[in-house]
Amino acid sequence: MPRLALCRGLPILVLALMATVASPSIFPSEAIAQSLERGPSGLPLPRFVSLKSGRVNMRVGPGTDYAVEWLYLKPGLPMEIIQEYDNWRRVRDADGAEGWINQALLSGRRTGAAAPWFKGKQATIPLRAQAEEDARHVAEVEPGAIGEVRVCNGEWCRMSFSGHEGWMKQTLVWGVYPGETIED
């Protein structure tokens, strides 16, 4: 995931991120997905969105006076909104990094990362022709690849990765809650 660190304590930050990635809080429970908590915007918290732009600053606090901690360079990256303050959203990325992004740089378009927890390992994630374990493979997707979420039925998501459309186990998608349904 293209992201540039803009701080000197990079080794400490990398260790902190590694500890956070191993944390179960990155994989929200079904109870969280079904939560009725609403933010000041009236929208549910937490919820998934994506980045609108190819250059998005994540700040340490909710405002332009706060330091930039990360610079994201890929539009469409999924982000989880976990808090709202005025027109700022506290977000978490697939690696567990948290910070603040202005709402104008976020989109309601749903995207997902294919099993980012397998990045750096010899693994591929099958994209299947149908929402069945034994369905033929349409494509093999690299861990961390970003795709557009079309539909989710609570167990499977129909997704599109670089023109290849098919079904992926919902538990292998970061950007959709376990058990969440998304209609076309």
Image (cartoon, rainbow, N blue to C red):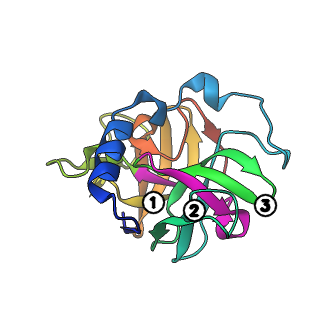
How far from the left and from the top, in percent, is residue 149? 54, 54
The amino acid type found where label 1 is placed reads: Gly
Write down the quadrant of residue 33 in the picture: top right
Residue 22 drawn above or below residue 64: above
Identify the residue shown where x is 25% and y is 51%.
119
Q: Nearer the viewer, mark 1 or mark 2?
A: 2
Residue 87 got which mark? 3
**On the image, which quarter does residue 103 sit in?**
bottom right
Amino acid type shown at disc 2: Arg
Residue 137 in view: no
Label ID, residue 147: 1
Amino acid type of the residue that numbered disc 3 sits on in the rendered structure: Asn
**Magenta residues?**
96-113
- The residue drawn where x is 56% and y is 29% is 179
> Who's the residue at 23% across and 50% down the image?
124
Q: Residues within 10 Å of mark 3 (few under 14, many from 20)?
A: few
How many neighbours does mark 2 have within 10 angstroms: few (below 14), some (14-19), or many (20 or more)? Answer: many
The alpha-carbon separation of the residues under discs 1 and 3 comes to 27 Å
Disc 3 on helix, strand or loop? Answer: loop
Question: Is residue 106 magenta-colored?
Answer: yes
Name the residue nearer the viewer: 16 or 111. 16
* Camera-side mark, 2 or 3: 2
Q: Which residue is mark 2?
A: 59
Residue 63 place in picture, x, y as percent: 70, 64
Q: Position of residue 142 (x, y in %)?
A: 27, 56
Q: Earlier in the sequence, mark 1 or mark 3?
A: 3
* Vertical comparison of 154 with 119: above or below: above
Question: Is residue 37 positioned above or below 39 on the image?
Answer: above
